[in-house]
Image (spheres, rainbow, N blue to C red):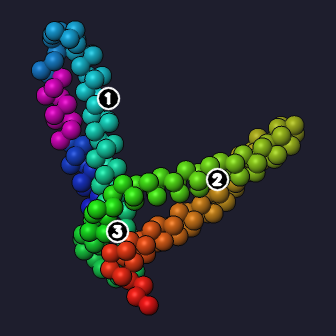
Amino acid sequence: TSLIITAIVIVISIVGFVVGAALVQAWSTPDDYGLSGLGAILLVFIVGLALFGVIVGFIGTRLIYAMIVCILEETGPVESMKRSWQLTSGSFWKTVGRYLLISILVSSAAGIVGAVITTIPSVIVSSTQSFGALQVVITFSSTLITGLTIPVMLSYLVLMYTDERIRRENFADV
């Protein structure tokens, strides 16, 4: 599924580049708004970047369950993307909100734990001037934090997927 998503993003990027280049060419002379070539390039870049972010965010949210569907429902990549699209239809903003909430909570907790884990050894190591040891401590702590946050995020995604199935398909029929 990630290859298909990457292909979609590349196609969108190429189309955006071509449209942006055409707009820059059209705006290459000053007009009523005072846009020169550089100003037009900057404007097109900012608008294009924002549009690209919105498109990638939309597609990413709609395909958020694709990996989970592929594993739990034992479907292929295209079928799992269709299923993910189906599960998120009608609950797009709820899915975005839930994912943003858990992302903010997990990244905040990871930041606090990372600051505590790296600060104490950093003070000790900096007093001994052993910066190689400091690099080892920082690498170890970031690996540890990543190892703890990824399972939390994936568990929450599975919980979101299960909730969507329960609400849509009466998955937990008792």
62 displayed left or right of 23: right
| For marks 1 and 3 on the same chain, the one whose residue lies earlier in the sequence | 1
Question: Could you tell me how far apart the alpha carbons at marks 2 and 3 are, in whole angstroms?
Answer: 26 Å
- State the image quarter where residue 162 is shown: bottom left
Q: Which residue is mark 2?
A: 110
Magenta-colored stretch includes residue 144: no
Where residue 85 sits: x, y (%)?
A: 27, 65
Depicted 161 relative to depicted 108: above or below? below
Local crowd size for mark 1, using a 10 Å CA cut-off: few (<14), some (14–19), many (≥20): few
Range of residues picked out in magenta? 15-24
* Whether residue 65 can be seen here: yes
Looking at the picture, which amino acid does disc 3 mark?
Answer: Ala
- State the image quarter where residue 149 is shown: bottom right
Q: Which one is nearer the viewer's eye here, 32 or 149?
A: 32
Q: Which one is nearer the viewer's eye here, 19 or 63?
A: 63
| For marks 2 and 3 on the same chain, the one whose residue lies earlier in the sequence | 3
Residue at the image point whose x is 34% and y is 49% from the top: 57
Which secondary structure lies at badge 2?
A: helix
Looking at the picture, which amino acid does disc 2 mark?
Answer: Ala
Residue at the image point whose x is 14% and y is 21% from the top: 25
- Magenta stretch mostly in which secondary structure? helix
Magenta-colored stretch includes residue 17: yes
Q: Which one is nearer the viewer's eye here, 110 or 100?
A: 100
Q: Which one is nearer the viewer's eye here, 103 or 35?
A: 103
Question: Could you tell me how far apart the alpha carbons at marks 2 and 1 are, in whole angstroms?
Answer: 31 Å
